[in-house]
Image (cartoon, rainbow, N blue to C red):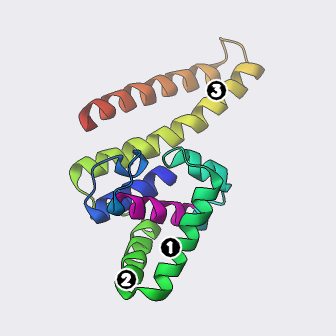
Amino acid sequence: MIEQICIIIETYYGLGGGAIKIKTRKREIVQARQIAMYFSKLLTGLSLAKIGKSIGNKDHATVLHACKTVNNLIDTDKKFKYDIDEIGIKIKNLGNIEYLSEVDKLKFTVSLLTEENKGLMNDIVELNNNATEKDTEYSRALKELDLVKRTLSQLNKICM
């Protein structure tokens, strides 16, 4: 979900893909990164350390500072509050990606498939522990994983 939040925020502010995660102190990128941290804390239930690691490899204190900064700006800056409300609507409508550009739609799809791939990998490891190679469910899961990997590879090539 953090990846999708970052894509939505980058799209909203017209930043390049992955801009939030690069190491820079440019004001517009720092602010976008802080907003991503704020929404990640608000919506994912992940620890501050995990959020920070996912967004630019930052530590928990940076995430905490980002959340305080965003909350302060919401209280004092009407334009900023409007932006946060708009981004919040877009995040809540994650299933509706019409507002994204074609490239961002592909990136969004890749990020969703990557998350699904992780779950599939865990399922296959569990099946592997409980099944033999001849087991049809295990074989079907391996074929599905192979298809997902090939699809991800093709989508990543398109996005690059």
Does 32 appear in magenta?
Answer: yes
Q: Are marks 3 and 2 in contact (CB under 8 Å)?
A: no
Residue 31: name its quadrant: bottom left
Residue that protrudes farthest toward the left in the picture = 102
Identify the mark nearer the N-term, 2 or 1.
1
Label 3 element class: helix
**What residue does disc 1 label?**
70
Mark 3–mark 1 distance (CA, rounded to whole Å)? 41 Å
**What residue does disc 2 label?**
82
Label 1 element class: helix
Q: Position of residue 63 (x, y in %)?
A: 58, 59
Category of crowding for the residue at label 3, using alpha-carbon neighbours closer than 10 angstroms: few (below 14), some (14–19), many (at least 20): many
Which is more toward the observer, 8 or 151? 8
**What residue does disc 3 label?**
124
Q: Amino acid at mark 2?
A: Tyr
Q: Residue at x 41, y 45 (%)?
A: 23
